[in-house]
Amino acid sequence: MSPSALNGEAAVGPEGPRQKSKATIETLRVGCIAMVEKNGQARRAEILSIKDTKSGRQFYCNFDNFNKRLDEWVPAKRIDFSYDVEWPNPDKDKQKDGKGKNTTVSKKKAPPSKAQKRPAKREQSVVSETVTPRPWPEPSETQPPSKAPSTPRDLEQKSAGTPAVGGDEMDIDEDEQAPEVKKEVEFSREAEIEKLRTGGSMTQNPTELARIRNISKVQFGEHDLFPWYFSPYPESFTQEDVIFICEFCLSYYGDKKSFTRHRQKCTLQHPPGNEIYRDDYVSFFEIDGRRQRTWCRNLCLISKMFLDHKTLYYDVDPFLFYVMTQKTEKGHHLVGYFSKEKESADGYNVACILTLPQYQRKGFGRLLIQFSYELSKIEGKLGSPEKPLSDLGLLSYRQYWSENIIDLLLELNDRDEKSSIESISTSLAMTTQDVEHTLQALKMQVYHKGEHKLVLPESMIQQREKAKLKKKRYISPENIQWKPPVFTASSRTWGW
Ligand code: ACO
Ligand code: ZN
């Protein structure tokens, strides 16, 4: 992971002098910088978009030194028109397609990774197919193939305009630039969190940068979700104050009436795959992107609302989705998931990972990450998450890696066993590179009398013991009922 990818300069403001004068609701336009109230304070914010809604005109603001996910639509009453507005510089304006100041990643061109070179294939998906619920446990059973649409349709987006009616569109940039690879040196948690708070977008696709959050609110089961980023739901949905997503089949509705009608008919009560793990807290289901295209695409659409840093591929066929749920009498509720390539040329064991916002910071991300490594252990492979990681992804992975390495070293120490980067890597199914980076970051490697040694400072041991008192949840590997699935080349993707 390149730390440069986190250096998101999210400062708004002119690169040169701009004209300043008073504005009104009517004259304020895209590219202006105004003083806008956020968290009770007037802050500089750039207007990225303007829309007229049922409740009046709204302005989409990117705030000075705030992460892009804190961008928001604000009503005019939050704009302080007593201040001068900085008017957009006409020359700079032309660069607003992403080459402007919001571009936060390094410009160095690197070859696209294999994972990013997947061919572009997309098509429509609106209605979810009906899936027969499967009882626990049937890990070896295969799922019935879903109704595949008869013709693939290339909905490649020519501009950031309206997608095909009832369809979804996704951006694919096959020449997407990979971030500059730099050696990590520092591991300051405070610095990370500060970057996390203030960092800008990590998007590398310039057209994506120009995009703004298009859905304001989602009703999902018992929860209201407030999206962070753009997700390519049909254009008509963006007019709605709230959209409705069925928490089981993940179909989406722009109006409550059709959603209510759907809920009366929908019989799905858990993700459409085999339950491969269960304990008294969570379950995991394995879903094949090829067999459950619509469901998986709908999941990607949800996930895109909270993931900004990756171009989303609409071709879900080459992926398996490991979906974590919590059970109530109503069914298995989606908590989070990770996707995984059926075959990763780069040895990735996770492509995208997400905990739904209402469940974040409760230890579920740790469970998802642990599960991904438990699968790698069963496969007898070393795994690593697909790069680049998001800010939150990096924080979570670093935490997972550090905790597990420290625990393993303590265990080995108790047993008086020697450890090495290789042995840690094999025990934890982590790549040697991830082990080494973590050890470096924790300053646990020393060079002594011509030998590399691993040291565990006393302070770190105490810190870890203290953290353990907090009683975290873990996956019990013995509850995993799973064999690595085998795919023929033709079943990984479409055959045309
Ligand atoms: N601030 C600081 N530390 C954090 C934060 C945060 N907001 N979130 C997670 N961490 C760190 C902490 O060290 C935490 O441990 P602690 O709570 O004991 O201190 C550790 O990560 C694990 O936290 P969890 O509660 O287990 O993680 P969570 O359920 O919140 O999920 C995840 C983490 C999946 C990254 C979530 O934040 C998320 O879905 N974010 C949006 C999508 C995203 O960015 N995904 C990763 C993309 S990278 C990729 O896909 C390969
Ligand atoms: Zn449904």
Image (cartoon, grey):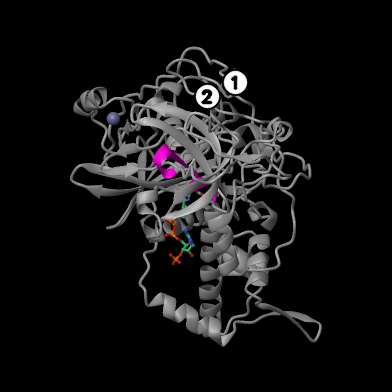
Q: x, y (%) of residue 220?
A: 31, 39
Amino acid type shown at disc 2 = Glu
Q: Which residue is mark 2?
A: 169
Nearest to N terminus: mark 2 or mark 1: 1
Quadrant position of ligand 2 = top left
Q: x, y (%) of residue 353?
A: 49, 47
Q: Is residue 330 visible?
A: yes
Q: Which residues are magenta?
A: 67-78
Can you tell which mark lies on residue 156? Answer: 1
Residues at badges 2 and 1 in contact (C-beta under 8 Å)?
Answer: yes
Give me the residue at 77% from left, 43% from top.
110
83 vs 466, left or right, is right
Q: Nearer the viewer, residue 470 or 19?
A: 19
Residue 374 covered by magenta stretch: no
Q: Is residue 415 visible?
A: no
Q: How many callouts does the rendering have?
A: 2
253 vs 288, left or right, is left
Q: Residues within 10 Å of mark 1 (few under 14, many from 20)?
A: some
Residue lying farthest top?
A: 151
112 vs 275, left or right, is right
Please identify the quarter of the rendering in which residue 29 is found.
top right
Give me the residue at 19% from left, 27% from top.
264
Can you tell which mark lies on residue 227? Answer: none
CA separation in Å, label 2 and label 1: 7 Å
Quarter of the image for the N terminus: give it.
Answer: bottom right
Amino acid type shown at disc 1 = Glu
Question: SS at mark 1?
Answer: loop
Residue 73 covered by magenta stretch: yes
Give me the residue at 56% from left, 71% from top.
405
Q: x, y (%) of residue 319?
A: 52, 36
Q: x, y (%) of residue 309?
A: 58, 44
Q: Is residue 420 above or below residue 27?
A: below
